[in-house]
Image (tube, rainbow, N blue to C red):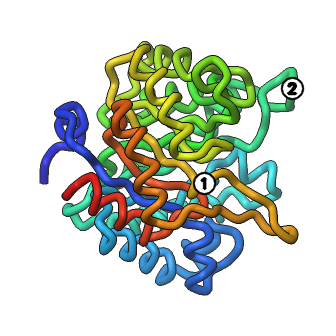
Amino acid sequence: MANFIDVINGGATVILDGGMGTLMQQLGGSLKSGENNLLHPQIVERAHRLYAEAGSDAITSNTFSLNAAYAAKQGEDKQKTEDALAAALEIAATVCDGKLFLLGDIGPSGEMLAPLGKGDPEQLYEAFCRQAELMAAYPLDAFLIETVFDLKEAQIILRACLDIAPQIPVLLSLTFSSLKKGGCTMMGNSAAQIAAAAAQQGAAAVGANCGDLTPADYAQVIASMRAACELPLLIQPNAGKPQRQGGEIIYSLAAAEFAQEMASCYAAGARLLGGCCGTTPEHIAALAARYKG
């Protein structure tokens, strides 16, 4: 199997996977995504395999919120969290089996940094170091830090990963709330600022996921990042702008529409392509058909 860094640095298109939480619920899993690793491992494996069958080149472990900081905020047991983390990586590694790239997913702490929140930078760093240490025991091709809206927290997580496992590349993806300043997070971090910081701190790729923007909107974010750095660029939007209907959040873009809107992101320079909330194996199959041939 080709080396992941060589692949992305060579400019090849890499198809990532899509949303996991809703898919696991549809398959009969728990509303708490991380619980499925222990309670319903067969459902987690099935979700991964559906994305593999759809054409994903990389599988993302079901470990998004499985760090001590997030667990403490939610009142979850630390050991149970670590057990769920290990189970997720074992499942994902089994599905990848050396034939697909394995990305170790790391999400935010769920706590805003002081003075806006109670998050302590050193405590968060220690929590993410522990998560990275546990994850590095598995055959990861890269860490994927995603859905972070504060560049300061993203940099803490990135530093933890690089300090603990410098041999494992790190992909950094933030979530954007507006197109101000060429793309802006809710904390006011611009796409250009994020891309420059990622390159300076040693990320292997940078990009965006989730958020309040459509796939077409995200083309402006990608263009801003491309102007600010030479790193490979990643994009995993939702299946359209989130809309509330009857107390439920829905995403309106069907698979073909999603793949079509992603053309502007591809034209702007993104080559790691996937989906976030509302996307399904059908959305990923549409991406693979359009951008991998």
At horizontal 85% and vertical 31% (from top left) the residue drawn is: 118
Query: Is residue 243 depicted above or below 47 in this figure?
Result: above
Give the labeled residue for mark 2: 116
- Residue at image position (68%, 43%) is 212
Q: Residue at x 36, y 75 (%)?
A: 49
Residue 106 shows in the view: no
User: Which percent across, then down, holds residue 273?
Assistant: 38, 48
When the figure is inspected, residue 50 is found, relative to residue 179, above or below; the finding is: below
**In the drawing, does residue 60 fall left or right of residue 245?**
left
Which amino acid type is marked by label 2? Leu
Residue 145 in the image, given as x and y percentages of width and height = 51, 40
- Tell me the quadrant of the picture where the N terminus can be found: bottom left
User: Where is residue 206, by image quadrant?
Assistant: top left
Identify residue for label 1. Answer: 240
Q: Residue at x 47, y 60 (%)?
A: 257
Amino acid on which disc 1 is placed: Gly
Closer to the camera in the image, 82 or 176: 176
